[in-house]
Structures are given as structure tokens and as C-alpha cells.
Amino acid sequence: MGTNDNFKRLAMSENGFLFDPQTGHSYTVNEISMEILSCLKRGMDESGIIKHIMDNYDVTEDQIKRDYNSFIVKLKQYSLYEETDKELAKKFKK
Amino acid sequence: MAKKSYYAPTIERKVAGAPGKFATSVPSYQDNIDEIPIKALIENYGSPLFVFSEKSIRWKFKEAQRAFSLHYPNVKFGWSYKTNYLQAICATFHQEGAWAEVVSGMEYERARLLGIPGKKIIFNGPSKTKNDLLKAVSEEATINIDHLDELFLLEEISVELGKKPRVGVRVNMDTGIYPQWSRFGFNYENREAYRAVQRIVTGNKLELIGLHTHIGTFILEPNAYYIAAAKLLNLAGYIETDFGITLQFIDLGGGIASNNTLCEQYLPGDIASPNIEQYAEAIGKAFNESPFCRKNQPTLFLESGRALIDEAGYLVSSVIGKKTLVDGQKALILDAGVNILYTSNWYKHKFTPAQPITGTIENTVIYGPLCMNIDVMRHGIRFPDLKIGDAVIISPVGAYNVTQWMQFITYRPNVVLITVNGDVEIIREKETLKDILHKEKLPKHLNLS
Amino acid sequence: MTIPKELVIAVTGLNAGENPQPGVPVIRSLRKAGFTGKIIGLVYDSFESGIYAPDMADEVYEMPYPSEGADAIMARLEYIMTVHTKIDVLVPTLDSELLPYISLENKLKSYGIKMYLPTREQFMMRDKTELGKLNENFGILTPKVLLINDTAQAYKIPEKMTLPVMVKGRFYEAYKAHNTEEITKYFNSLRAKWGLPIIIQEFLAGEEYNVSAIGDGKGNIVCSIPIKKTVVTEKGKGFAAVVIKDATLDKFTKNIMKSLKWRGPLELEILKSNKDKQYYLLEINPRLPAWIGLAIGAGQNIPEILVKLALGEKITPLKKYTVGKIFVRHSEDIILDIATMGELTSIGELHDLRTKPVTKRKSKFMDNKGG
Ligand SMILES: Cc1ncc(COP(=O)(O)O)c(C=O)c1O
């Protein structure tokens, strides 16, 4: 399957503006999205990212998990993220 | 270190010419209605919840009364029951001095039950039955005749009771607005209305006391009322000269727009809708120009419904779910659906979060809880991200919803009134399974237990 | 006297591309009048090209759409005033903004923001759906108009008017339709954008003229420039025009001002009919036109006068202007870094635009992978 790192090429500005130099699309994101994208760029996995957000923000695990997943759904819709075979396999084993 | 406040992550693709972040308002929140916290309302009365403000009903009524009497003092309102016939609402209007305007036997009964005498009831509509009319005639209600068959029926009743029904003739006409309501009453332009009057006079079994029209609803053009009033007054003049009958009232019906926003409108209703003064001025102008008026000072009846009650009603609802649709749009699922917010068919209601907003503003579709594709409360609005359990206030919803709502898959919610003193009173209790089963009958052979 | 440089003037409508708005020439005119103070642009999206043009606004702020209502606009202005800058004069330049701003007039006045606008009644009188009444009430000739609310009515138009007809949206856009199919096509697209009713206007063949003028609210003209558009794009936008003089046209304009007692700026669209050689009023746009730059070329700085009137200055009516001045619209590409536009997109404002032109700004991406 494809790579999961299209988001890596996004240029991000401090105030939440993203530019994809390959497709020419641009996006706006909020602070939490910026945090998650930076984590993804650094190669962190879902549980690491969720912990990172919970350590820094006032949010329950339940809430962030839900929000994280719908955020990933959006990244996929914009073709900025795809799960690798390995990740998919891991998911379905559970 | 204290943790930072959290809101859900979002990402939106920017398209050339698409609205910027601020192009749509960051809606402010409203956490109370008449100083009663929304939170407390939900805790005590559940969600969804219809909330009416007695203060705004009374204020609006006084406003309207003042606006019209400024131009023409002999004005009287008849409360349009169909717009909202909860007893508490009707009683409030009656306390303010309104008569009752009813369009069915059931509404007539409601008005009588509240203690309104027949003499203060205006009976309209195309569906009056013989029984309804027998009662209305004997109690001396004002009956506005919709069609010829009703006229004949009334003549029959007149003979039967030995009592002359007090009637008006409902007139329809071209006032330049669209659609022209021509299915009720007798037409002005083709002289059908004049002939109906002629018929009444020759029959000599009815007491003709007025003319009535209701030109349509949510009329954004005050001048249409000027035309309507001028035409009725002109006809009244002819009735006086041709038949020697001096009419006592001119009834211009309802139809004045509330501050709601029609789906077809670009600017929001609070800017686009004329204010009540403009309607009053247009009608007043026709009355003050009319020689018939100068001579006889007939009563001006108004049957305004939505303009008087819409803004006094709110629907409080809570978020029960969120999802991202395949096109990337956000969706909120509320616990109130189109079955109790019938007016979402033609209005873009205002949706206001009931708690401070933290989340990002996104394109959002707002759904109700019905398992039906049509259950869309509001298409694509810019709306902040809310949490499950957060409340929103939908407004204005005071007109037509609590009469046209449907019971469907669950119970219709509590309706409360915040009184002038700041008390909260239930004016219609949430339904129970018992209420709904109450009228059902299970044939013996289908009894499973 | 020039406008004091301590004042801050806000101007809306900075698009100068395919769909030109008046904001850019308004700002240019104010600068040409010698105004060196702060001008802020109030915009709706980051693609309004005037934001990025050199020597335009000092700051720009994204605003809520007029459809969000007066409260939303007020809230945004309050933010701008408390956090960033005072505003002394506000010049709305778009049709759809006017009702909200008219409804805010008193409130803005209490904040020290002055405008020079028509009244709500005047604004309503010139609504495309009402224009025909000017004929009844004041004898101002207007083309016949039908309002339609559904496509069934569209099919009946040939019974009531000769084709072709003009199909118009309530706020913007107009198309010539030759048959009912075209009428319904435009009906549907206009309805989706601007709501109902759709205006069907009798098509009159003839010469079209435009007048930009300001009325003093008492029936007098403060200044006025008549033009003939010489290049009109497919969308009906004038891309070249010449200043003219025609005594009958002047009289027609005078009569309109006298009848309406118009206060504020307006643009008249007037047609001299081929058939009867009479002048017909096609439209009153309740604002300055996008070609207002030509007025200053002809010797009347109409935007400057508008600001002065807003400030309460007494203006002696201007009568003279130079006939034969023309404008030719010229568009140019502005090159800048996407991150600059991104800044506006994400925070809704841009600052120091005159002192630090966008064309010279460096990319602001945190990790410079965008290159
Ligand atoms: C006869 C009559 N009167 C009054 C009304 C109230 O109308 P509105 O709520 O538009 O004021 C109606 C509504 O249809 C009506 O039919």
C-alpha cells in the first residue's frame, strides 16, 4: 500500500496555515492540529500522540481518542495520510 | 504546570474565494434565557426543551398595539390560535386584551375553555362544520365566510335558530405579492366578493358586519397591506352606498413577517424584515385616506401570529453525536429533530451555542435524531466545534412549531414558560408512553400476552 | 482642506480583478487627495487582490459576510477597535453591505465612526423590486419589471413581455435571456446565489450611460460625473469609459436626486431608448461605482468629498468637470509568497502593508520545506 507520510511535505506556518508544495493545496488548522501534525512528522504513533496531548491539554482520554480518529479521517480525505499495511494489520488484529 | 484548554483538532482546505475564517461570524454564545441558565433549564426539564418568554410576548404585543394605534387608534388584535394554541400562550395574549381568532371547532372549544366569550371570537377558515357554526352563531361569534356553501349553511342555521349570524366576508385579492392566496374567500377583482355581499343582503338572513382578508404569510412588503386595506375599504364604501349597510370592522388578517430568515433570503431576518411600524404606517395610511373610515371609524382587526410570538420561543437542544461526512464536512447530531421544528422547512433558524466557545469554527451540518435522511435542522453553517452534551439554542421558534409538531419515534418534550417574575412553569408536559397509547386499541385476537 | 492625517478611514470591497469593486479606486482617490493617514481595508476573503497591491491599505481585516447580520459585523469592528485601531470614517462600497451598515449607523456613530449613507427608506425605494414605483410616484421612466418566484412563472413571461428580457438577481448579476429555457437557467443560478424574487426586466435597446454622484439628502447634487462605458465585458463590467456631457441626462439625474432626496453616494444606470429617445432609469446602485477613479481624472474627487461629508464638512456643490477623459482598465499580476496570504487566512488580518510591501516579505513557514 501507499506511504503514510504525505503530511510530511506540508509547510506549516506558526499561525496554522499549511501549504502542500506538491499539490498546491493550502489548509488552515488550529493549535491542537498543529501539535498532532508535528508529532506525526516526528514519527510518533497514535498512543504516543494521545499521551502527548493529554499531558499538555485539559482533555479526557476518551475525548482525545475520538477527536484524533476523526482528524485522521480528515487527513485521509485530503490524501495527506494513509495507513501502512503494518498499521492496518495491527489495527485488525486487536 | 497547568494544562492548556483543549479543543478538537480540525483541518480545512482553502479554496480561492472561499470565505475566510472571519467571513462568517464567530457566533457569540448565550447561556441563559431571561436570566435563567440554560444548564438549569436542561437539568430540571430535560433536553430538548421549548422555552417561551412571557416577558417578550407581552413586550411584543404592547409594541404592536402601540405601533398601530399611533396611526389608527381603533385597532384590535385577535390572537391567531393556529400559530400557537398552548393555553398559557393564548391566555397571555388574552390578558393583554386580544380576542381569539380560530379556524376550527377544536380551536373554538379551546378559546371557550379559557373563558373567552363567543362575542370575542373571530371564526375563520374553510372547514367550519354545521355543529361548529350552530354553537358559534348562538354564542354570537363573528364568522368570516369563506365560500358560498358556508353562506348557504349559515342561512339555514339562521332560520333554524331564529337568530341572525354576525358575519364578515373573507376577500382575496391581488396585492402585488406572490403567491397570491386566492383559494380562501371571494375574489375582489372579479367582483365575486361584491356578489357575495349582494347575496347576503338579498337573503336577509345574516347580519353583515365586516370584511376580512388574509393576504398571505411572512409578507415582506408593507405596501401590500396598504393595497389590501385600500381595497377592503373601497368595497366597504360601496356596501354603504349601494346597500345602506355600514360595516363595523375591517379585518386584515395576519402575515406580518417575524425576524426569522427565510431559506431563500440572503440577509438575515433581523435586517431584511420590515419592522412592525412600517406595516402599521402602510395600513394606517390606507385607513386615514379612506372617506369611509373618516366617517365611520370601523374597528381594524389584526390577526398577526408569527410576528407576535416567533421571537418569544426558543428550542434548547443538546449535542448527542458528531461525525465527519465523506465530503469532509462536520456534522452535529442534536436531540431535537425536524418533527418538533417544523419551521426548519422554510427558515434558516439561528443556532447559538449555550456555553462559551472553544472549538474551531467549521462548515457544519446540523442533524436531528430521527433515523430519517430528511432530518436536517440546518444545512452548511459555520459553527464552532461543540462537545457531546453541549447545548444550543435554536431561535426564533415560537410560531407554528408547537402546533404543527409531530409525535414521531419518541416523546414530544416539555414546554416551559419563563414568567414575568422569573419563575419557570411547565406549560405542556413531556409526553409519556401512556399518553401515546391512550387512544390506541388492540383488537382482542391480536393480544399477544 | 485636506483630510486630517490623524484620521483612520476604513474601506470595503478591495477586489480589483475580474469582478472589480470600488474599494481600490476609493483608496487611490483618497491618497491622491493628499491623505497620508491610515487606511484600513475590510475584506471578505484573502483573494481580494487590492489587499496586496502596493500603496493601498495600511492594514486589512477579514469581516463577516453581510449575511451574518449586523451583530456579527459590529462584533468584528469592536475587536478591531479595541485591539488594533480606531476608525473615524467607514466607506462601505458593496450593495449587500449597505442594509447592515445602515442599521448600524447610530451605533457606529456612538463609537465615533462616521458614514455618509442613504436612509433605509431610500435604500428600499431603489431595490430592484421597487424601482417601478419611481415611475408611479415621480414620473421617472423605468423599464417594465416582473418579479418571479418559481419557474412556472418563468414560462408565462412571453405572455407578458416581449423577449429578450433581462434576468436579474436581487443584489447582483444580470443576464439577457432570449427564451424561457434561458430564463429558467438564469433563474436557478441567481436564486441559488441571491435568493428570491428574481427580477425580470423588459429589455430596452439603446445607449447606456452611468452617473456617479453624491446627494446631500435635501434633493441637491453635491458632485456628479456622467460617463459612457466603451468596453463592457461579457459579465457587464465596464473596462473602459469616457466622461461625457449631456444636458438632458443632467436634468434626468437632477430630477432623480430631487425626487428621492438621496443622501450619500449612488451610481445611476440610465438608458437612452432607441425607440422613443427617452431616458430610462435602469438601476440605482446605492454606492460608488468601481470606475470612480475616472471621476478624479475628470476633476472631481468624489471619494474625498464623500469622506468630508461623512465628517460633517460643508461642501459647495461641484459643477465643473472635464469632458473626454477616459479610463482603460489595466490589470497586473502581484507576486507574493503564499505564506503571506496564509497569514491573512489563518489570523484574519495583515499589518504594515504600506511600510512592508507584501512583494518583499519572506516566507514565514516554520520549517522551510515549502520550497
Ligand atoms: C385567517 C388567518 N389569520 C391569521 C393567520 C396568522 O398568520 P401569521 O402567523 O402569518 O401572522 C393565518 C395564518 O395562516 C390565517 O390563515
Image (cartoon, grey):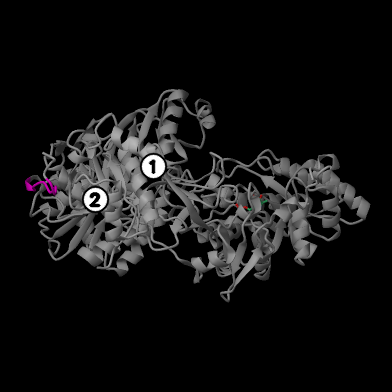
Whether residue B21 is visible: no
Q: Which quadrant: the N terminus of chain C?
A: bottom left
Q: Is mark 2 within 8 Å of ligand 1?
A: no
User: For mark 2, what is the residue?
Assistant: A34
Instruction: Decide: few, some or many residues near mark 1? Use Cα within 10 Å; few <14, some 14-19, many ≥20.
Output: some
Label 1 SS: loop
Residue at x 83% of width, y 52% of height:
B133
User: At which x and y percent is residue A78?
Assistant: 30, 37
Q: Is residue C166 magenta?
A: no
Q: Is residue C214 above or below residue B425?
A: above
In the picture, measured across the screen, residue B297 lies left or right of residue C189, that is right
Q: Residue furthest bottom?
A: B421
User: In the rendering, which numbered label is found on residue B329?
Assistant: 1
**Image quadrant for the C terminus of chain C?**
top left
Q: At 68% across and 58% down in the image, what residue appears?
A: B85
Q: Provide residue B354's location: percent of width, then percent of height.
A: 45, 62
Which contiguous range is marked in magenta? Answer: C360-367
Q: Is residue C369 at least partly visible in the picture?
A: yes
Along the viewing direction, whichever of A77 and C293 lies nearer the viewer: A77
The image shows residue C96 at horizontal and vertical percentages of 35, 48
- Taking the spot 86% from the left edge, 59% from the top edge, the residue there is B138
Left or right position of C21 against C296: right
Q: Chain of mark 1?
A: B
Label 2 secondary element = helix
Three-letter residue code for mark 2: Met
Question: Quick check: B14 above or below C55?
Answer: above
Name the disc covering residue B263, or none: none
Quick check: is the Cβ at mark 1 less than 8 Å away from ligand 1? no
* Mark 2: few/some/many CA within 10 Å (<14, 14-19, 20+): many
Q: Could you tell me what secondary structure mostly forms the magenta stretch?
A: loop
